[in-house]
Image: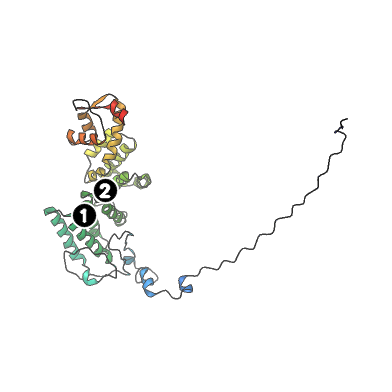
Amino acid sequence: HTNDWSKEPLPQLDRVVIPPPPPPAPKPVMKPILPPSAELGPVPESRKRKFDTGPKGKGKKNKRASLIVIDDDGDDGGFAPAAAVVGTCQKVEKEFLRLTTEPDPTTVRPLEVLKKALKNVQQHWKEKPEYKWAWSQLKSIRQDLTVQGIRNDFTISVYETHARLALEEKDRGEFNQCQTQLIALYGDRTDGNVEEFLAYRILYNLYRLNATAISVLLSTLEDSPLAQRPAVQHALAVRSAHYTKNYHRFFKLYSEAPNMGGYLMDMFIEREREAALNSILKAYRQTISLAFVTSELAFSSERECKTFLQAKNVIFTPDGRAIDCKDTCAAM
């Protein structure tokens, strides 16, 4: 016997009543954070002076004192004075020492003495280039300029001189410090050596592969007469050849670099040579002469080029006069 379920009443389930969730707990009342002066008592005068921008008058900051810039990396001595001092020291040569207290005016040289000090460094470098000594003297000059709040054409010439010596000696950190200060010192200028150092900035950012910084530079150059200057034109051409991977054009520009642009390009020339070499190996596949590669990668001699290629594990033909591209690609 089977039931006709179509005629049977459906069973009724007991209804379960779900209680509402409890109300949220009231948020605790946060105690307001008081400034140190209210919570810990009065701020010591020494701490106040640390952040003081100098004497004020009629509600305005002292512009000369507020322009003193000390980098976090201790660019010019590691201590920001509360106000610019006036130096009285007459020593032309002075070793660089990092400041840890307020500068003593008797140890700071005035502007006229600093001009003599810079000429002394330049003359000494021509006769006997000693970078360690020149670095110390130039850092000391920069420190004396900073603590006195001197920012003029002479200040620019000091940073330009130090930047060029740093480039020559491959001191990238010091060069970057100098060019960072020069950006602020130049302001909106388009005369002097602005063109030279703007070109260096473009090339330096290519070395760092800093596309953002280069984009910002390009946007500022849109309506600037500096964009038409030879050194800047060269740097922009290098940037274009780099991004389009036009290695033939890139190494030609490397050989024609104006001013000290070649020193900047030396920072990343090996990286570009490696990339160009990979393109050459893939393009030729069989063999390619050593003389061609030497010329194409802007080496000064076949011997120098061969040393570079051997370090990259390139395989040569039996006579050593050409690269075996096929075997080299297979080995790599």
Hey, what amino acid is under mark 1?
Thr
**Residue 56 in sight in this render:** no
Badge 2 density bin: few <14, some 14–19, many ≥20, Cα 10 Å? many
- Where 268 sits versus 45, above or below? above
**Which element is circle 2 on?**
helix
x 27%, y 47%: residue: 200
Q: Which residue is mark 2?
A: 195
- Going by the picture, which residue comes out furthest to the top? 286
Hey, what amino acid is under mark 2?
Glu
Q: Which residue is mark 1?
A: 161
- Where 157 sits versus 43, above or below? above
Q: Position of residue 274 (x, y in %)?
A: 29, 36
- Quadrant for the N terminus, please: top right
State which quadrant residue 21 falls in: bottom right
x 26%, y 40%: residue: 270
Q: Position of residue 192 (x, y in %)?
A: 24, 52
Q: Closer to the camera, 9 or 32?
A: 9
- Where 4 sits versus 137, above or below? above
* C-alpha separation, residue under disc 2 versus residue under disc 1: 15 Å
Q: Closer to the camera, 202 or 97?
A: 97
- N-term mark: 2 or 1: 1
